[in-house]
Image: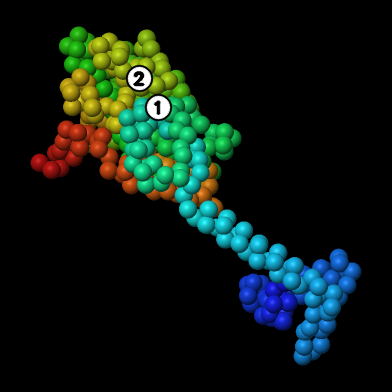
Amino acid sequence: MFAKVAEERSFAGASKAMGVSVATVSRAVTRLEERLGGRLFNRTSRRLALTDYGRALAERASKIYTEAEEAEDIAREASSRPRGLVKLSAPLSFGTRWVAPLMPEFFRRYPDVAVDLHLTDVHIDLIGEGFDAAIRIAVMEDSSLVARLIVPVRRFVVVSPTYIARYGRPQHPHDLGAHRCLSYLNRAKRDIWRFTHRKTGEECRITPTGPLRGTTIEALLPTVLEGLAITELPEFAATQYFREKQLEPILTNWRLPEGGMYFVTPTARARPAKVSALADFLIAELTDARWTAEAVMGWKPPAQRRKQA
């Protein structure tokens, strides 16, 4: 502030140039004079002039001010240009099939950004473990995190044609009590399937029981594909098996709670350009949900089919 006042020859001019009040500049210069033990300016009601002592310091102070401006400009440019490392978490199955294949195009667009991609179905503590962001597929509850919805994600109860041939097709959620149903170990609460009838609104809760529980979709699929059990899958994992007729959805007059795919960050404030670039890129690419049942095989829920008919 002293350097700016010396340049402008005015407290008012310095305050305007720096975007602060005249009082702030005046107090800062007074504190500096007290700390240095000498007057920097001779002040009158009409004139402000450097003392000999102030003149001796003004040139060096001006250099310090210029260097500070240059350092700030460099820092501002670095923060506005996407560069550096982004630590990103994503679900194992979804990340492998849909996120990892997008990385080459991202790196072509942003060659100065690197990504640590952690693929896991474990619920990551973004803040505690130092993550910049995560893709989460869930029914989001209240959270201190900032979550941006990308697309809704439905869930299906699925079974193989072989299983139906052996054990029959469940007609009501209550029927699942007599069937082997595989579930997940890493749910925040006990794994419960909550059904709501699409037409009547009837609700039904089922606790799946079966010979296997796993932390990933991949852990459950082989047993289900072999026709030995039923499980529940998110849409992005199920539809490829619908298309190949290896699995089919059952209880389609009922729906499970619809979750969503979210891009999650610890905070929206002062988000680095590298994180914003990755967020915008992934959201733009993943909003076109090519894994949906409609996109893969033209499937629609029964209620929607009746409405169109």
Q: Which residue is mark 2?
A: 218
**Location of the C terminus (image quadrant):** top left
Label 1, on which residue?
92
Query: Is mark 1 in CB contact (under 8 Å) with mark 2?
Result: yes
Query: Horizontal and vertical percent for residue 88?
Result: 47, 36
The answer to whether residue 37 is seen in the rendering is: yes
Secondary structure at badge 1 equals helix
Give the mark, 1 or 2, whose residue is nearer the N terminus.
1
Query: Which numbered dot is residue 169?
Result: none
The residue at 24%/19% (across/down) is 159
Taking the spot 68% from the left edge, 80% from the top edge, the residue there is 8
Give the residue type at disc 1. Leu
Q: What is the x, y in percent for residue 147?
A: 45, 44
- As helix, strand or loop, the secondary structure at mark 2 comes to helix
Point out residue 272 in the picture as x, y percentages from the top left corner. Answer: 51, 49
- Residue type at mark 2: give it: Glu
